[in-house]
Image (cartoon, helix red, strand yellow):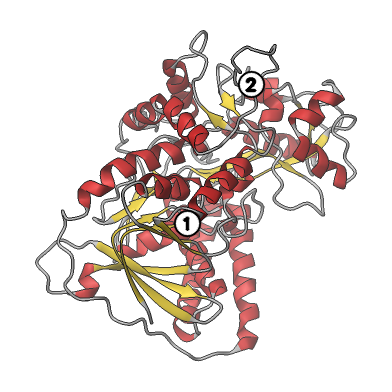
Amino acid sequence: MSVKHCDYLIVGSGLAGLALALKLAQKNSVMLITKEKATEANTSWAQGGIAAVMSKSDDSFESHINDTLIAGAGLCRHNSVKNIIEQAPERIQDLINWGVEFDSKKIPVGQIPEADLTREGGHSFRRILHFADQTGYHIHSTLLKQVRHHPNIELREDLFAIDLIVSQQIDPLSIHPNRCVGLYALEPTTGIVHTFVAKNTVLSTGGAGKVYLYTTNWSGATGDGIAMAYRAGARIANLEFMQFHPTCLYHPDARNFLISEALRGEGGELVDDQGQAFMKKYDERGSLAPRDIVARSIDAEMKKSGANCVFLDMTHLSAEFLKQRFPKIYERCLEFGIDITKNPIPVVPAAHYLCGGVLTDESGRTDLPGLWALGETACTGLHGANRLASNSLLECLAMAHNAALQLPQTLDFLPFPEHDPKEWTHSQATNADEMIVIHHMWQEIRTLMWNYVGIVRSDKRLRRAENRLKNILSEVKEYYSNFPMHTDILELRNIAIVASLTVQCALLRKESRGIHYSLDYPFTDPEKDRVQLPEDTILLRGLH
């Protein structure tokens, strides 16, 4: 076992992790580890863009804040919303300084370029910056190139974080407060478990879309950071708010391909199999209503008609515009025989973004000293009960900036153990025949969550999920304890914990709010509306 000491350990290579690494590395050395190749992250899959008030002539911070609060259905934390949204133009300038480009309007030669802003559901104005329909990929690849060549950043790929290390594990009799001091990480190719000792550990491991059977997320979005933080004793909040994106491509050979909300922002209309628009029946904003409303409306239409999907119709727009504005979506759909310039796109909702997570402030500070969480891993209160479109990349950048200001002030603030953690020990027994059972359990959890903890819920369905997950957690614990370290088992353990916590959160919320819709409690309780950290936020204390 190797022991690596560092001041800053960042786990995860999405936008939040990369931005923080670049900010800290201006004056400090940084260690960044990621469980697969650094190119793999949900950021790369983000099509639509990043929300920021760039046109002061008609838009304003107040409008963006208000749109966020409305979408969040009364559970946003106002301080976080204000902090993150008002620094958006500066964070866009950070991206430009790092080499990121955004689409600009076609203007006469000699004039200053102006951003080509688009609009998405829930936004009152055009305020979404984009790079065609590959904004996330462009941003991520540009920042990753900077990280790979930065002399103060050590990037270690293919290291799977197993568990956080807390000081009480090293010295149970210490009189000092418990704190995070690093983590153990598995190198899958060798089976070696490395120990990272860090004064500050930052979890930027993304969300947990793979807890569900159908998702727009990449295959590694298994809630690793949330599960690790919970096991270490941090508080987890609002996991019942898993946002289902209304439009994922419906095709037997297509998996996880998002049909960006920007298509609806440019005039796309949701229609049924008869070509009839239906969203106005559910919300006066039609196809540009917030995501929770659109996803529930699609779900209701499909259940009412028995159809397998609905359709997004773009055929009234010019073919030239669609090919130029949405080249990736156009090409991908064409691979499946769908010409979006001539045919409506078959779409269904899919698990997309987790609005809950590890409870933090807007700088990513958790209630476990020495542990920080950023981006989708965190629950800052920005999104409340439902995320406003394209606020996620902004949150990553703003939290990274805030954390970069706060982290250096904490380096010598908390007492640190005098000794290194003990060497990692684990069972070396093996039974290859049993690995198939791991995959069966993985599939069972994801199917269970989709069927019982989906877009529309009931206490009866949630209780069924709760009972089955108790048994699954017991079985997972047995496999984890009796088999050598393997990434499939580690991910299974994490999605089982996150699934169980999600069900607990959902059962505790006795109302329908935002993404969480219960047949038993179909109305929103106005007594529970908050603009600060809400008293009725569902908080679960970790296990340690």
Q: Position of residue 401 (x, y in %)?
A: 37, 39
Whether residue 265 is situated above or below residue 298 in the rendered picture: above
- Gap between marks 2 and 1, in whole Å? 31 Å
Residue 349: give its label.
none
- 468 lies above or below 192: above
Quadrant housing the C terminus: bottom left
**Position of residue 71 in the picture relative to residue 332 (left or right):** left
At label 1, the amino acid type is Gly
Which residue type does callout 2 highlight?
Asp
First in residue order: circle 2 vs circle 1: 1
SS type, badge 2: loop
The label shown at residue 116 is 2
Q: Position of residue 274 (x, y in %)?
A: 87, 29
Where 95 falls versus 435 (above or below)? above
Disc 2 + disc 1, Cβ < 8 Å: no
Residue 83: x and y in percent read 35, 29
- List the residue tagged with mark 1: 12
Residue density around tag 1, few if under 14, some if 14–19, many if 20 or more, within 10 Å: many
> Residue at 47% of width from left, 90% of height from top?
428
The location of residue 156, given as percent across then percent down, is 48, 65
Judge by depth and name the residue closer to the eye, 44 or 343: 44
The residue at 65%/87% (across/down) is 433
Q: Residue at x 47, y 56 (%)?
A: 12
Closer to the eye: label 2 or 1: 2
Residue 211 in sight here:
yes
Name the residue located 36 percent from the left edge and 55 percent from the top edge: 202
Q: Is 6 situated left or right of 112 in this image?
A: left
**Residue 239 appears in the picture as rendered:** no
Please, which residue is most extreme toward the top here? 57
